Image (spheres, grey):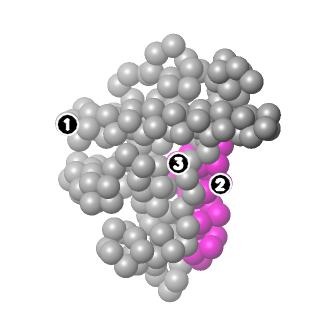
Amino acid sequence: MKNAEIRSLLQECATAFRLPRYQEIPNIGLYLEQVTQYVNGFLAPLGCSEITPSMISNYVKKGFIPAPEKKQYHADRIAYLIFIAVTKNVLSLEDIVELFDMQKRNYTLPMAYDYFCCELENMVAFVFGLKEHPAENLGVTHSEEKDFLRNVIISVSHSMYITAFFSRLKQEKAKQD
């Protein structure tokens, strides 16, 4: 399989990529295994590394996300977990927490999370070759924190592309052997 064919396959995957907006995240309380399946279901189209129950428990134990209420994770915690799962390949967990704190100073969680989703989908579409230019000026405010988050998202998008490309390339080589 040629690189152009792999890029075409990746574009198909990127077309299907969409994260749930804050209001779409279940707020009924999901148990650990359900949260794991829910989050990984959104990351699968681009071959992102999965999040495991032990990883989630570790994030709670270290205080990166609030503890579940009666062993149930609600929308706020799930939004944090989606963000961590997406950004953990380009940022340390300590830097992710710092980024949370930066965003909290200016934005509500639903606003920051929804901007993250829109901008990530925008950048994935651009990096994976679905559009010629990324959309500019997403969101309703302009701040250094927003610009910084956009730069993180750009890094994440490129990392996702590189990982997905090499994963497909290895799959194809394995088929030929």
In the image, 77 versus 47, the foreground residue is 47
Residue 14 location in percent, x, y?
A: 62, 33
The question of residue 29 being in magenta is answered with: yes
Residue 170 location in percent, x, y?
A: 66, 38
Q: Quadrant of residue 147?
A: top left
Q: Residue at x 64, y 70 (%)?
A: 34
Closest to the camera, between mark 3 and mark 1, is 1
- From what the image shows, is residue 150 above or below residue 100? above
Q: Secondary structure at mark 2?
A: helix
Q: Quadrant of residue 139?
A: top left
Sequence-wise, which precedes: disc 3 or disc 1? 3
**Left or right, residue 117 beside residue 37:** left
Q: Looking at the picture, which amino acid does disc 1 mark?
A: Glu
Asked if residue 174 can be seen in this view, the reply is yes
Closest to the camera, between mark 3 and mark 2, is 2
Q: Residue at x 35, y 25 (%)?
A: 137
- From what the image shows, is residue 27 above or below residue 98? below
Q: Secondary structure at mark 3?
A: loop
The question of residue 3 being in magenta is answered with: no
Q: Looking at the picture, which amino acid does disc 3 mark?
A: Arg
The circle on residue 41 is: 2
- The residues bearing labels 3 and 2 have C-alpha atoms spaced at a distance of 14 Å
Residue 52 location in percent, x, y?
A: 55, 67
Asked if residue 122 can be seen in this view, the reply is no
Image quadrant where one finds the C terminus = top right
Sequence-wise, which precedes: disc 3 or disc 2? 3
- The residues bearing labels 2 and 1 have C-alpha atoms spaced at a distance of 32 Å
Sequence-wise, which precedes: disc 2 or disc 1? 2
The circle on residue 144 is: 1
Residue, disc 3 = 21
Q: Which residues are magenta?
A: 19-45
